[in-house]
Image (cartoon, helix red, strand yellow):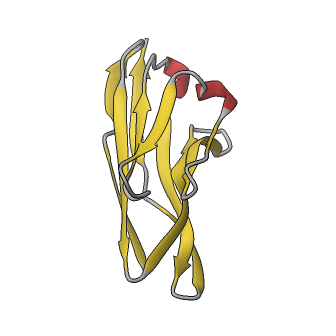
């Protein structure tokens, strides 16, 4: 069982910034990748940014150059710095973690944190 704790969402004006964080907890975790996706009403879930244990990153096209995913010394927790936010960034942002607990693979989603950008 893996628990995810997300924080940092809120309301911000266009052009503003927010920082999200996501921390995973559980037994014998070996995290392979951790990151953020988002889902706006009536739209499909889309990639925001993912960070792997090997330090590689992958960003959705719509956030490249504005958002930065980062970590401390270890992959957990991860942070998402969101700059130059626009109304189209409004969505529920969901943390995702993939890895292994012992020999068992896991793929968990957080409950999500709302980000609302006003024009």
> Front-most of 48 and 44?
48
Point out the image quarter for the N terminus. Answer: bottom left
Which residue is at 42% across, 74% downward? 2
Q: Is residue 78 left or right of residue 103?
A: left
Give x and y (percent) for residue 88.
Answer: 55, 23
> Front-most of 65 and 12?
65
Give x and y (percent) for residue 112.
Answer: 43, 51
> Front-most of 26 and 114?
26
Which residue is at 68% across, 29% downward? 61
Which residue is at 64% across, 26% downward? 62
Point out the image quarter for the C terminus. Answer: top left
Task: Name above or below for residue 61 compared with residue 3.
Answer: above
Q: Is residue 90 visible?
A: no
Q: Quadrant of residue 28?
A: bottom left
Number of marks drawn: 0
Give x and y (percent) for residue 17.
Answer: 36, 22
Give x and y (percent) for residue 83.
Answer: 43, 21
Task: Name above or below for residue 86 compared with residue 33.
Answer: above
The residue sitting at the bottom extreme is: 103
Q: Is residue 96 left or right of residue 22?
A: right
Q: Quadrant of residue 18?
A: top left
Task: Name above or below for residue 118 compared with residue 96.
Answer: above
Q: Is residue 7 visible?
A: yes
Q: Is residue 46 left or right of residue 1?
A: right
Which residue is at 44% across, 76% downward? 29
């Amino acid at each position: 069982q893996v628990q995810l704790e997300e924080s940092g969402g809120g309301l911000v004006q266009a052009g503003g910034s927010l920082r999200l964080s996501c921390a995973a907890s559980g037994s014998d975790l070996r995290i392979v990748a951790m990151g953020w996706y988002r889902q706006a009403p009536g739209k499909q879930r889309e990639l925001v940014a993912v960070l792997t244990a090997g330090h590689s990153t992958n960003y959705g096209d719509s956030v490249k150059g504005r958002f930065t995913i980062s970590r401390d010394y270890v992959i957990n927790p991860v942070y998402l710095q969101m700059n130059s936010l626009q109304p189209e960034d409004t969505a529920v942002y969901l943390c995702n973690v993939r890895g292994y607990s012992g020999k068992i693979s896991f793929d968990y989603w957080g409950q999500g944190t709302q980000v609302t950008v006003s024009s």
